[in-house]
Amino acid sequence: MSSEVPRRMFLKQVTTASGALTIGVATDASAAQAVAPIAVPLTGYQSLSPDEGAFTEALLKVMCPADGMTPNGVDCGLATFFDRQLAGGFGRGDRLYRQPPVRSGKPQAGFQLPLTPEQFYKAGVAAAQTACVSRFAVKFEELDAASADAFLQEITAGKIDGGRVPLEQWFNELVYPLFAQACFADPLYGGNRGKVFWKLIGYPGLPAFHTQDMVTYRGRPFPGAAAPKSIQDFS
C-alpha cells in the first residue's frame, strides 16, 4: 500500500471495472515530487473522537501516501468522507437488517454482526490500536510508515488478533470499501477533494452519463476529463 506500483494497479483495476476513461499520467521528473496539498477547510469530526480521528488519519496516510500521483489521504479529504459516512445513515445501519440470530454468511453478503457500521469501525480501531501498542509499545499513529504498512498488511491477512473483534473482516469488508468510495465518490461527500482522483484516472464526473462519448473516447483522452464536474458544479 505504501508503494506507488500497487496504487497504480488499484486505480487501473477500478478504472477498468467502472468503464471510466483514462488519460495519461505524468511520468517526467516533476511527477516524482509529492503533489502540493489541497486547501483543507477547518472542520471537526462528527463521529470520530480525537483518538479515533488520529488513528484514522494515520491509517489513510499509509493507504494513500503523498507522492507524484496525489497528496496524502487526509489532504484528499478521505478522513472527512469516513467521518461523514459513519455519522450518517450508513454508519447507523439504516439499510441493514440486524435482528438476531446473527449467522455466518457468504463474504459477498458483507459482515454479519449485531453492530452498526459505525460501531464496528470504532470497535476495530480500538482493537487495532490495542494490538499495535501491545506489539510496538507505541500507538499506530506513532509508527514509521514502513512499520504501519506492514501492520496493516498483517491485519488484512488475518494475522493480528483483535480479541472479540474480527480485524481481518473489519479491514477488508469495511475499511477498504470505504477507502475506495472515499477516493472516487463525488467531492460533495467530503472525499476526492479537488476531484484529484477523477483527474488522475481521466473521469469527467457527471458528464460521464453521455453514453456516446464513452463509446467514442474509450481508451483515449476525453476532453471533459481535464475539468471534471461534480454535483456541486450543477447546484
Image (tube, rainbow, N blue to C red):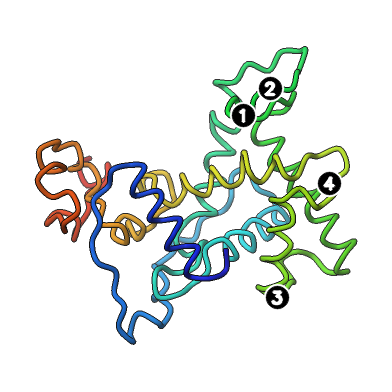
C-alpha span from label 1 to label 4: 19 Å
Q: Is 184 drawn above or below residue 9 in the view shown?
A: above
Q: What amino acid type is highlighted by mark number 4?
A: Gly
Label 1: state its secondary structure: loop
Q: Which residue is mark 1?
A: 110
How far apart are the two marked residues, 2 and 4, measured between alpha carbons? Answer: 20 Å
Residue 105, disc: 2
Judge depth for marks 1 and 2 and give the one in front.
Answer: 2
Residue bearing the label numbered 3: 144
In the figure, is residue 224 to the left or right of 11? left
Mark 1 or mark 4: name the one nearer the start of the chain.
Answer: 1
Marks 1/2: CA–CA distance:
8 Å
Look at label 2 and name its amino acid. Gly
Return the residue at label 4: 162
**Sooner in the amino-acid sequence: mark 3 or mark 2:** 2
The quadrant in which residue 133 appears is bottom right
Spatial CA distance of label 3 from label 2 is 37 Å
Q: At 14% from the left edge and 38% from the top edge, which residue is drawn?
A: 210
Three-letter code, disc 3 = Asp
Identify which amino acid the numbered label 1 is placed on.
Answer: Gly
Label 2: state its secondary structure. Answer: loop
Q: Measured from the top left, where is residue 135 in percent x and y?
A: 88, 64
